Amino acid sequence: MNKRKDVLAKVTGRAVYANDIELPQMVYAKVVRSTVPNGIIRSIDCKEASRMPGVIRIITAEDIPGIPSLPRERPVLCLGRVRYIGDGVALVAAESLSAAEDAAERVRVEYEELPALLDATKALEPDAPQVHETGNRIARYITRRGDAEKALVEAPHVISRSYTTPRVQHVCIETEAAVASYDPATGETLVRCPVNSPFPIRKVVAETLGCPLTDVRVVLTTIGASFGGKNYDIAMASARAALVSRLLGRPCKVVLNREESIIEGTKRHPLFADYKVGFDEEGRLLAMKIRLTLDGGAYTSKTFPVTSRMAIEASGPYRVPAIDTEAVSVYTNQVYSDALRGFGSPQVDFCSEMLIDEIAGYLGKDPIEVRKLNMLENGKPSAFGQIMEDVTLPECLEALEDVVDFPARRERIRQYNEMHKRSKKGLGISLLHRGESFGAAGQGIDTASGMVSI
């Protein structure tokens, strides 16, 4: 049996996290954040903050030797324009964390506030405020099979339902943190940070510093949970720490408190979904028309593969002869959305499973039996036409039924609910499916390659 290598150090307190690192002559940096959701930066007044004890320097996007960000990517520091409450506007470098925090509160930023787009469902309306000059649409993916409109007209039963899922935060016990040190003798910047994917960190740091990738080295510290957030969130902390270290010639630590992590950290895409489904007297699915709108927030990141996956998985692990799915992701002046445990699957899983339950309720049938009637099987096409292989849903459900006596369990729940007014119990079951990797909508089509140098 394989054992996790980090467990003993963690449970005995010997694990070294990024925030545990202390280096000689280390400085601390805090971010001055936007207080408006959309606006032009007219001025940044640093005079009062600069005079505070312990403050070494206040840094803005103008001081960045490389680029603050690529178009539509989350900026290390905003250059002239902010797009959500929490955007980084300036960095305060100080001898202590408390000095940096106090000074950051005294940096005065004047904005020309612009109309803000806060409702994703209105993002594509003609008069909607434009979050980026290229428009508010990030991505659009369509899955069609058969004639859904015709099948819906001919279906014995049709229901329409709307579902929403909220913005969700990772809330790792360890907040985002990074320590960077610049070596003027070699030109190398060393970044120590908790991350499960070091290459995006290296890329963003190199872009910020305006240096080759070979001048940036990333060393992984102990990770206090990730869930997808310890990627581009850590890239921001790492790039800011590296920027301060390069400009001051001293090591720099950036660590977010819980409030800052919630303000800036990656969120799951909120989803606004409309489902129209046709089915027969037994509950057999005949057609679905699905419209999905994803709130991508102010910047792009991995919204493309999240949108793609939702378009593919929106109908759940069921056979649907005729389907018409459109998934559209949009910019808003909200906090940035990215991958979070499932790449869009959890949102549409909720929708498809609620829909099956509602079909069963509409017909007065057992929701488990309706699932059995429709679930994917070996050799059968999925909703988007892929012939499925190695499908284990029937075996999984059979094994579950061997363990759980559903009729007896439901009777016990009914009796409990009759006897208790202040608390109630329920019984739920869900069937899920999801693909692995990014797919063709990711950062390149999924491939494997190797290079041997002798």
Image (spheres, grey):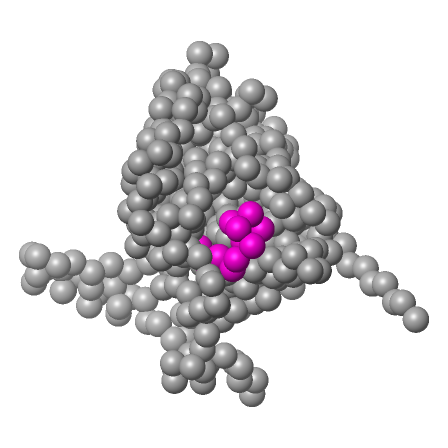
Coordinates of residue 54 in the picture (x, y in percent): 35, 52
Coordinates of residue 256 in the picture (x, y in percent): 38, 54
The span picked out in magenta is 244-254
Q: Residue at x 67, y 43 (%)?
A: 210
Above or below residue 326? Residue 10 is below
Question: In the rendered view, does 390 fall on the left or right side of 294?
Answer: right
Q: Residue at x 42, y 55 (%)?
A: 28
Q: Residue at x 54, y 64 (%)?
A: 192
| Residue that extends furthest to the right in the rendered view of this protein | 454
Q: Residue at x 56, y 84 (%)?
A: 2
Is any atom of residue 425 visible in this view? Answer: yes
Coordinates of residue 339 in the picture (x, y in percent): 51, 49
Would residue 246 be counted in the magenta stretch? yes
Which one is nearer the viewer's eye here, 120 or 353?
120
Coordinates of residue 161 in the picture (x, y in percent): 37, 34
Question: In the rendered view, does 202 fall on the left or right side of 327?
Answer: right
